[in-house]
Amino acid sequence: MGSTLVVANLLKKEYTKHPSYDCFISACGQASKKFKQTVLAFFAPPKVSTKARFMNIHRMVKWAEMVLKHSPRGRVSKDSVVSKLRNYLGKLPEYKQFIKRFLRDASPLLKSQEILKAQGLNMKTYKECKELLKNIPQSSQVRIGFITWMEKQLIVAESLGMGNTGMPICSDNIESLFGLGKTHGTGEVKDANRIALRLPAFCGSVNRESVRMAMGVTVKEQQEVENKLLSLTRQRRKILPTPGSLTDSLSTEFDCGLTLLPVPKNDEKSKDVTDITANFEQLGGPVNKFTKQPYAPNNAEYNNRAAA
């Protein structure tokens, strides 16, 4: 089991029975409804999947901590932006103690997770993580559970001869790839082999000119184009972590079209085209006729047939 699932399971076991948990989630949901379609829409809480809530719930709790800092104590004008913010927050300020305790446990675990993902698990990273966990009470099952998991994995690492180099404990890359395969017509398929066979078929046809032009787009050019657009994400990143900057949220930005990947004008006439589905057919047998059609996310009939 990877560190991400371990952290999620530990937090789930500790907090699903907490008396404030359900009320906190409900308060976040109510706040989200009030923020949307308003001038403070960028303050809306992040979306958290209900199927894997504890994989990302720390994002919602961190959001709550930051947004509450924009509502300082004291009286404010009835028509002020801060007054509107307090109205939208509803009962969320009542759960400050729950937020503080959750982040006390979650923050060291997430920092440890980053270390293990980047460097693997060995005695050096084990000691670094254990040092981070000192902020969690020794009697906490969250702390005990994570240390126990690391010690068990160290035994496995030693048996594989990776005790010094660091044993990889993250499968995010392969999970992301297969997750992408699920969204493109395979449905909620549990069989990894079926997903793997479908992945190449969705790569489509490309020519050398398209690839050359796409590879020529620099990060700086991409950022220049994106920065011209009004973005709730950018507003959220700029204002949410900075208490006292709420008035900046009303600033307006220029709106324009967006093209990140240039396309050759003679794309349809190009003869230098690589059709990856041809190789897929040679390796995996005859291709289902529906997989050769362009992916149409709004075409329910196509998706149902492709998932069959």
Image: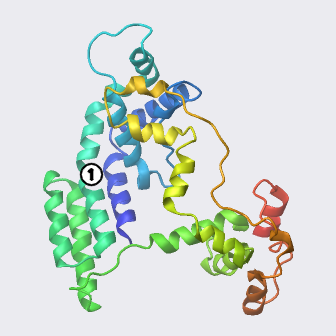
Q: Quadrant of residue 4?
A: bottom left
> Residue visible at 25% across and 50% down?
105
Q: In this view, does 299 lie above or below 157?
A: above
Q: Nearer the viewer, residue 144 or 83?
A: 83
Vertical order, 224 against 280 (above or below): above
Q: Left of 273 or right of it: where is 112?
A: left
> Residue 96 appears in which quarter of the rendering?
top left
Binning the other alpha carbons within 10 Å of mark 1 as few (below 14), some (14 to 19) or many (20 upward) gives: some
Q: What residue do we see at 82% from left, 76% from top?
A: 270
In the image, taking residue 180 as reference, residue 82 lies left or right, namely: left
Q: Which residue lies furthest to the top in this view?
A: 78
Q: Mark 1 points at which residue?
A: 107
- The reply to whether residue 203 is visible in this rendering is no
Relative height, residue 235 to residue 9 (above, below): above
**Residue 262 image offset from top left, x and y in percent:** 68, 62
Looking at the picture, which amino acid does disc 1 mark? Ser
The colour scheme is: rainbow
Front residue (pair 251, 32): 251
Could you tell me residue 296's position as x and y percent?
A: 79, 59
In this view of the protein, can residue 165 be seen by the observer?
A: yes
